[in-house]
Image (tube, rainbow, N blue to C red):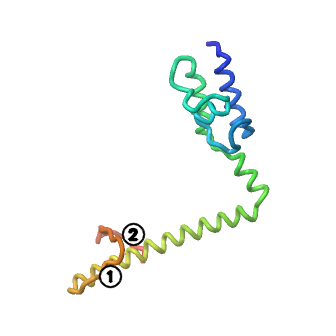
Amino acid sequence: MTLTPTVKEYFAALERLKQNKPDRIEKGSQINKDTVALEAGRKRGSIRSRPGFETLIAAIKTASSEPSTVGTKRRIQENPRQTAQIEMLKRDLDIARSRYMSLLFLNAEMAKTIRKLGGEVPQIGGVSVINIDPDSTDVPF
């Protein structure tokens, strides 16, 4: 199958996006049909599922599924201390979420006990029902 000049322009735009060296759009943009079209100087939505675009669409799907590590590698090389700090903050966020869920569980258990003993539990803010399996073995304490 021969490629039309328009499709060749789209392929050239796709290659520039893969190398993270676009001419018309921002660097680091996601690779999809719209960004390839804009990089090729066409309108958004001009790449559609029609005859002649099958190979281009397949190439775009392949390129978009590949992990883009160009920006990440460059950031790690330029700012290793900042990258380490980001990883530490992600870990701290995960720990905080675990603590929050544990406290939420304990709060729900205490509210159940208070209700069982005939007390009234005040509702502050939006409250949702939490169903906890009493036979579960994955209790956080």
The amino acid at mark 1 is Met
How packed mark 1 is, by other alpha carbons closer than 10 Å (few <14, some 14-19, many 20 or more), is few
SS at mark 1 in the image: helix
The amino acid at mark 2 is Asp
- Residue 138, labelled with which disc? 2
Front of the two marks 2 and 1: 1
Q: The N terminus appears in which quarter of the rendering?
A: top right
**Where 33 sits versus 120, above or below?**
above
Residue drawn at 67 percent across, 29 percent down: 40
- Specify which label sits upstream in the sequence, 2 or 1: 1
Q: Which residue is mark 1?
A: 110
Q: Position of residue 65 (x, y in %)?
A: 58, 39
How packed mark 2 is, by other alpha carbons closer than 10 Å (few <14, some 14-19, many 20 or more), is few
Q: Quadrant of residue 68?
A: top right
In the image as oriented, which residue stretches furthest toward the right? 78
SS at mark 2 in the image: loop
- Judged left or right of residue 97, residue 8 is right
Mark-to-mark CA distance, 2 and 1:
18 Å
- Judged left or right of residue 140, residue 28 is right
**Where 101 sits versus 68, above or below?**
below
Residue drawn at 65 percent across, 64 percent down: 87
